[in-house]
Amino acid sequence: MIMFAYSLVCLIFGTTFLAIKIGVDAGTPPFFSAGLRFFVAGAVLFLFMAWKGKASFALLLRKEMLFTGAALTFGTFSALYWAEQYVSSGLAAVLSATGPMMILLMQTAVLRQKAPSYSLIGCIIGFAGVLLLVLPSLAIEVSPLWVTGCAVVLIGEICYAAGAIYSKKVTSTFSGESPVALNAAQMMYGGALLFLLSLFTEKVHPEVLLSFHTAGSLLYLTVIGSMVGHTLFYWLVAKTNPVFPSTWLYISPPIAVGVGFLFYGEAVTWITLIGVFTIIAGTVLVNAGALKQLLFKPKRSTPLVHPVAGEAYPRKQIL
């Protein structure tokens, strides 16, 4: 069951990038659709946890939930949804895999935490992978919005890194709360902020939301991507540890590139594939310490809740 759930998590999170792309290409306002997805998913999950007696409504009044939602959901996904208007879903997925590298760089540059040499080498390899993805396309005539879209995805990953680091403090402060309830609360705040951004930047036409592609994209992302995917992820955390489920980051980018190529006709070249696996190799090297701990140390009787800095972080809701 653990491997089956893990396989589903990788498949779900690997296909959400294409679902986002289909929705925005169909004319859905990106900020509004992202806000609708996360607010609805967060509200349903939170109400369910409250009904089960595992969440308190007082949690919604805490500023920590606002700050976490502003970084993890609002910052990350406002960037991703906007960018997917101009870049392919596969490229967006691969660029999003730089999240762990952003965390390491932020810990090193801002928090002055010393990083292992192999992790820094992993960042260099990952950056080389980004260059392999982006530079060949710059050699031909491309839209400035394409270049901007790539940069915006990376900016979104910086927001994710900041939110992930901050959320470690939040989970420690609210250690008595369910991680699912914490995640649901921050999704609601992130969704509300996305609605606010949409209000000032977009015109929402209700008829657009009724098309097959738009409704299907929203339904898949809300129910399968956010509700099912998150529930399976936190179930895996409870059954194993926070590191193992997070390795979806290494599996999902190739899945995203593959489904984009097979089902949406997105271009894939040999340089693209080399860039994909270079970024994955860099990400694995950045997290080598956590993966070594997972593979070679005996299992603990109780799940790890607060891993050491740089080894495990909240799963991105892409997801």
Image (cartoon, grey):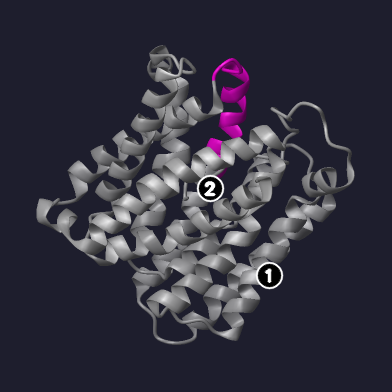
* In this rendering, the label closer to the viewer, 2 or 1: 1
Using the image, tell me which numbered label, if any, was put on residue 291.
Answer: none
Residue 278 is labelled as 1
Mark sitting earlier along the chain (2/1)? 2
Residue at disc 1, secondary structure: helix
**Where are the magenta residues, as a range?**
161-177
Give the total number of marks visible in the rendering: 2
- The front one of 242 and 123 is 242
Residue 186 place in picture, x, y as percent? 43, 30
Residue 172: x, y in percent?
63, 21
Residue at the limit of the structure toward the front, as seen here? 1
Q: Crowdedness of circle 2 by 10 Å Cα count: few (<14), some, many (20+)?
A: many
Vertical arrangement, residue 61 with respect to residue 1, above or below = above
Q: Residue at x 38, y 75 (%)?
A: 264
The residue located at (26%, 42%) in the rendering is 197
Q: Amino acid at mark 1?
A: Thr
Given the image, on which type of amino acid does mark 2 rest? Ile
Q: Does residue 102 belong to the magenta stretch?
A: no
Above or below residue 35? Residue 270 is below
Separation of marks 2 and 1 at Cα, in angstroms: 20 Å
Q: Are marks 2 and 1 in contact (CB under 8 Å)?
A: no
Q: At numbered mark 2, what does the secondary structure look like: helix, strand or loop?
A: helix
| Dominant secondary structure of the residues highlighted in magenta in the image | helix
Residue located at (77% from left, 57% from top): 285
Q: Position of residue 269 (x, y in %)?
A: 55, 84
Q: Dot 1, how many residues are within 10 Å of its Cα: few (below 14), some (14-19), or many (20+)?
A: many
Camera sees residue 111:
no
Question: Residue at the location (40% across, 52% down)?
Answer: 79
Frontmost residue, 50 versus 145: 50
- Corner quadrant of residue 44: top left
Residue 309 seen in this snapshot: yes
**Which residue bears the numbered disc 2?**
158
